Amino acid sequence: MPVQVTPYVPRSITVHLGAPDSWAENVTVSFPDYVKNVACSEIYPTWEPAAIQANVLAIISFALNRVYTEFYPSRGYDFQITSSTAYDQKFIRDRNIFENISRVVDEIFNDYIRRTGFVEPLAAKFCNGTTSTCAGLSQWGSQELAQQGYGAMEILRYYYGDNIELVRDAPVQSLGQSYPGAPLRRGSTGAAVVTVKTMLNRVSQSYPAIPKLWPVTRVFDRETEEAVRVFQSTFDLAVDGVVGKATWYKLVYLYVGLNRLSELVSLGQQFQSFSFQYPGLLRQGDRGSDVSVLQYMLALVAEFDPVLTVIQVDGVYGARTAQAVREYQRSRKLTADGVVGEQTWYALYGEFAGIERDLRNDGVNFPQNAQAVPALAAGGGAAQSYGSASRLGQYPGRALELGHSDGRGGTLV
């Protein structure tokens, strides 16, 4: 069961009129008005239309990245962005707005750019390109490129790389917060629990004392409580095993920082996180993400078992999937009815988890593709997840003992 991660455009945004730690007033304005103000403060209305569009998209994307990553709220601030160019973008309260820039913003305020395959809006940093330079877009440089005939996306790719794409018509909604609104504790269930486990697992890569949680299910169980306690102890939070607001936003703060989601060079947030908890009975004719997860597990296990047929992941429980399920059930001495009940699901999951864990730990022979989850969501197969996954890893048919050779010059010593 996937947890969809969908950035949105807030109806309004709160701007701190100064540096983050300085005393200054907060003002709340509509998001389009914010973008118009910044654009009119940063660029010139006489510039080429393509340059104006490129700069507006950079401004939008940077601001949405701040909103999406909860960059300031996760640090305890009550605003989404500042007016300080040392940290964010220039915003001048009550400034005049140029008509042509206003029209451009009205047309594209809910479009943004992101890295291909990632979900978070790009932290599209920029500088004027004359008195200051940076790794991002040069504002005056964008005007020069526009004068040479570059389009808006060509300008953006010139500065941010070819691996960016334009998202159009993002949903517009009232500004919310990621915190689910009530503490999560043992017995809690749902998408928010998956989010907590995903964040804990990422943080534990850098802080190994925090136990990793596997599988990532929708249930806040005893193991999750223990991992939360260790996390809280590590970061000087109240150790109660409950994910309240303070623990939640400390997790958000670390997750964003470790994945560099608020930086121009980001490790990227994948589109979905998957829970491998049993979803209920699956049979031929079913469709959806639960079928995709089933097919993904079947496909990966089949790569290492010649008895099984490798299938495509398309989210449709058709005749090929039913046949693959029957093959698996027969080979594991389960009732071969082509229907996935709890026994079949967890038997398959147990094998899948062991293989997947071994592959994740073997980065030499099985280099992971960072886009494995998006590939699954798009209908890819197991081969898209691991560069060298194949049946070469199957049991050789005889016990290996001291002195045996692999036929390629290798000998067990």
Image (tube, grey):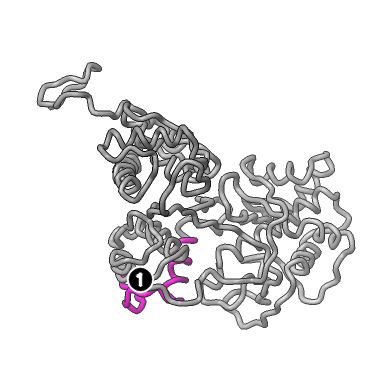
Residue 156: x and y in percent read 70, 46
| Mark 1 lies on residue | 187
Closest to the observer, 255 or 11: 11
Q: Quadrant of residue 29?
A: bottom right
**Residue at the limit of the structure toward the left, as seen here:** 402
Is residue 387 rendered magenta in the image?
no
Magenta region, main secondary structure? helix
Label 1: element kind: loop
Describe residue 394's horizontal placement relative to residue 196 as left or right: left
Q: Residue at x 64, y 71 (%)?
A: 175
Describe residue 334's horizontal placement relative to residue 31 as left or right: left
Against 50, residue 178 (above or below) is below
Is residue 241 rendered magenta in the image?
yes
Against 411, residue 234 (above or below) is below
Q: Which quarter of the figure is the C terminus placed in? A: top left
Residue 277: x and y in percent read 38, 55
Which range is magenta? 231-256
The amino acid at mark 1 is Gly
Residue 302: x and y in percent read 36, 32
Question: In this figure, what is the number of numbered marks?
Answer: 1
Against 301, residue 262 (above or below) is below
Closest to the observer, 101 or 351: 351
Q: Residue at x 50, y 50 (%)?
A: 267
Task: Report crowding for label 1: few under 14, some 14 to 19, many 20 or more residues within 10 A (C-alpha).
Answer: few
Closest to the observer, 265 or 232: 232
Q: Quadrant of residue 209?
A: bottom left
Describe residue 70's horizontal placement relative to residue 333 as left or right: right
Closest to the observer, 204 or 329: 329
Residue 55: x and y in percent read 75, 54
